[in-house]
Amino acid sequence: MSLGRVLVLAAHPCAESFSQALHRTVVETLRARGWEVDDCDLYAEGFDPVLSEAERRGYHTSPDNIAPVADYVARVRAADALVMVFPVWNFGYPAILKGFLDRVFLPDVSFKLVDGKVRPNLTHIKRLAAVTTYGGTRTRALLAGDPPRHCVKRAVWHVCRPFKMRYLALYDMNRASHAKRVAFLSKVTREMEAF
């Protein structure tokens, strides 16, 4: 029996990267636990992150705003859970992931505007997780405001309102030993088993 459908958004261009090892661990563990996994590797799928002029002008015109990314919108709408796997670059999301959120998390998809206020519209997503790595230390991330953590735990969380939220981060990746990376992979496995 399936636990539900989980959309895994992965954002790293290099198959040999540690981020892609995390991505594979997430997908394999969730499948083994009984989830139906929609594995969306944004680079492998050739997702275009650029919001065009026409898309921006029609951003608030629903349902026409959905047409350029209709397949991705359908995948988000079909999900019971969302797991984002990405590296932190320059204290932010990779551009391809930021572009996905800009182009797919649209009005009447991820949120509704009611009297000028954002109301959540992905409340069918009951579980949310981010699995990420930072080149620098946690202190450096905190000094920069740690935007990715806040974007996931505030902005993405707000439009979903999941009952379960996990933010799994390996800091200081530039100096992480093999043992530290293996320990983090094990942590991610445990978290996905309990997801």
Image (cartoon, helix red, strand yellow):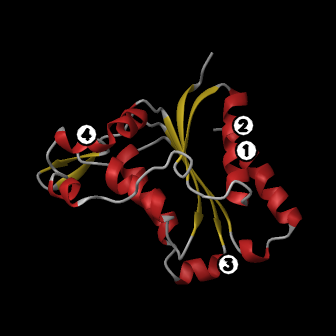
Q: Position of residue 160 (x, y in %)?
A: 39, 44
Q: Position of residue 186 (x, y in %)?
A: 80, 50
Q: Which residue is mark 2?
A: 29
Q: Secondary structure at mark 4?
A: helix
Q: Residue at x 46, y 33 (%)?
A: 79
Q: Which residue is mark 3?
A: 137
Q: What is the C-alpha distance between the residues marked 1 and 2?
A: 6 Å
Q: Residues within 10 Å of mark 2 (few under 14, many from 20)?
A: many
Instruction: Tell me which label, 2 or 4, sits earlier in the chain.
Output: 2
Q: Which residue is mark 1?
A: 25
Where residue 67 is drawn, which disc sits there?
Answer: 4
Give the quarter of the figure containing the C terminus.
Answer: top right
Instruction: Tell me which label, 1 or 4, sits earlier in the chain.
Output: 1
Tag nearer the camera, 3 or 1: 1
Instruction: From the viewer's perspective, tell me whether residue 103 is left or right of residue 179.
Output: left
Hey, what amino acid is under mark 2? Answer: Thr
Tag nearer the camera, 3 or 4: 4
Between 165 and 83, the residue placed more toward the observer is 83
Is any part of residue 166 visible from this angle?
no
Q: Residue at x 72, y 37 (%)?
A: 29
Could you tell me if the residues under marks 1 and 2 are in contact, i.e. CB atoms within 8 Å? Answer: yes
